[in-house]
Structure formats: C-alpha cells, structure tokens
Image (cartoon, rainbow, N blue to C red):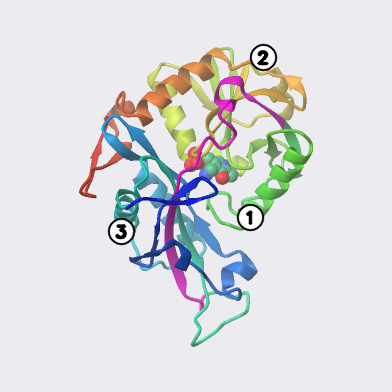
Amino acid sequence: MSGKDVNTMKIAPKVWKNGEFINWDDANIHVMAHVVNYGSSVFEGIRCYETIEGPAIFRLTEHMQRLVNSAKIYRMDSAFSRDVFCDAAVELVSNSGLDSCYLRPLIFRGLDPEKPSFGVYGLNNPIESYIAAWQWGKYLGEEALESGIDVCVSSWTRITSNSMPAMAKAGANYMNSQLIKMEAILGGFSEGIALDDRGYVSEGSGENIFLVNGGKLITPPLGASILPGITRDSVIQIAREMGIEVIETSIQRSALYLADEVFFTGTAAEITPIRSVDRITVGTGKRGEMTARLQEEFFKVIKAERPAPNGAEWLTFINASGEKKTASA
Ligand code: PMP
C-alpha cells in the first residue's frame, strides 16, 4: 500500500483506531467531544528511521509506556495495553508504504452520541485511542543540526507540577508550549526556553535542554517541570558510555549565556545545537565539539550502525511481513 500525499507530505493511508484500521479521511471526531472543549488528551511522538536493516521504530516500548503513564495520571482507562499499542504501531508502519515516519499515538476523551456528556468532569466520556503516521522532516530545519539555532528565554513560565504535571505528555500542556513557541517565532527566534516557576531553566516548547561546561554535560532535573524525554535519556546513556560526566541540576538563566555549548534534544528535534540565546553567542557560535560527538553516536544508534549503550534494545525493526523483531543493533 502506498502512502497518501497531501501538499507533498507523505501520510500513512490508514489510522489505527481502538483496535482497528480505518482510512485517514475517516479519522474524525465530533466538535463537542470532551477533548475539543477541555483539552483532555495524552499523546506521544515517535520516530521510525530508515536503517540498513529496513525501517525501525526508536524506543517504541519506552514511548508507549510514557503514553500509558500519561493516561494513568489523568485517569484515562484505555482498553489497550502498552504492548497492544506497540504491536499496532508496527502494523501501521509496515502497511504504510513509508520507509521512515513520525508516529502519533493519541488517547483522548470523546463523546458518546447515545449518552452525551458536555461538562468538565470527563469520566463519563468514552476513551478513544488512535495512532497516525506521516513522513516528517527535520523539525527545526535541515540546516539546524549542523549550524545550530537562535533561541530566546521565554517570558512565559513553564507549567508547574502541582497544576499541569509535565511528567504527563498531555495535549493541554502544549497550550503553554504554544505560547512559548509563538513568542519565539514572532520575535525572530527558532525556539523559546521556558524557566520553571522558581526561575531555573526548564526546557524548550518541545525539547529538553543540555549545557556543556568544562567537558561535563549538565541538564535540568525532572523536578524542573520537564517532560522525561526519551532522547534526553538516550543522550545521557550514550554520554555516560563515552565516559562523559552527566549532572542533573538546577540551571540559572545566565548559565545559558556562559556555557561552552548548549543543545536541545527531542524526538522531533533529535540533537539540535543552539548557537545563541537572547542574541548572546553561545561558545563559538557554531555546533560545539561535544554536541557533534554526541550527534554522531546518536545517529549511528538510530540507524542501527552501532549497538545502544549497555546492549539495550532501542530499535524495533519492521520487516516486510509486518512482524516485529527487537535488536540492540
Ligand atoms: N519536552 C517537551 C515539552 C516535549 O514536547 C518533548 C517532545 N516529546 C520533549 C521534551 C522531548 O521528549 P522526547 O525526547 O521523548 O521526544
């Protein structure tokens, strides 16, 4: 089956919905669904890479675990387990006709047409589970991975764990991210960095952040209202295996300006160097040496050119018959 082209973007022709595959064009919901009115969704973003052994989904189990964790925090009882989501993702990719793609699993509160419920209390609304996939290029631009990007510190504060837990990847969190991103783009930057409610560095609108100082890697701890990023974890593990010391600690805004190197990590952003913050040049204003080394190792892992650290299984290969196989490389 070949993918659908919309404005040159290749899209998987099917969408997985509650255990079945439906056509992309039929994946619609009612305007009065709970999620539309109250933002009650949790989701994931996962990349499937083209490797020397065919397409492979990166850290599928960890992403689907985070999806079910996010759903649990919001008392969303999906009828489907982590492993069912994993199998569905593999089947979707294997029938998509795409060599590489971005996967978007989504769980939300919908609307029961027989017993409609319109209030904030969502526990009487049905839980809907979907996975869609499409081909998505480099999120922050092709050039960004090499040249780096210009970012600003946002005037918006990151959501706090007592109001909107950043540990859940909830759709509503991205209202905060949208404020950060819009302000950055309209101000002539590529991305914004949010500070947490204590004034310490938190993360980008859709990325975790790392600083390099004196050969050490420094990143905000989970307590800084960050999403526990899977790319963040991958970079920490790869760095430690390379003998690089990684420190998770509170970071002041001014430390961003003085760091030797700064970079973002994320499924969409991968490892993107930051060349300036608030128009202050970071380091040499180019991709730093450690950023380049980490990128090199990370890209080898995702392309199955080297094993993941500690023999972990980070790639789920999609073979032609649609069966899955996990391997460390
Ligand atoms: N923080 C936020 C707010 C994000 O949206 C993302 C992207 N999912 C990340 C961090 C990076 O997480 P991951 O590496 O798991 O994609």
Q: Quadrant of residue 328?
A: top left
Dot 2 amino acid type: Gly
Residue at 63% across / 52% down in the picture?
174
Q: Secondary structure at mark 2?
A: loop
Depth-wise, is mark 1 or mark 3 nearer the camera? 3
Dot 3 amino acid type: Val
> Does 196 sit left or right of 70 as displayed?
right
Residue at 52% across / 77% down in the picture?
111
Q: Magenta includes 85?
A: no
Q: Residue 77 in the image: x percent, y percent? A: 42, 68
Residue at 57% across / 82% down in the picture?
117
Which residue lies under the disc numbered 3?
84
What label does residue 91 carry, if any? none
How busy is the neighbourhood of tag 1: few (under 14 within 10 Å), some, or many (20 plus)? Answer: few
Dot 1 amino acid type: Asn
What label does residue 162 carry, if any? 1
Q: Secondary structure at mark 3?
A: helix
Which residue lies under the disc numbered 2?
283
Residue at 47% across / 59% down in the picture?
106
Q: Which residues are magenta?
A: 123-151
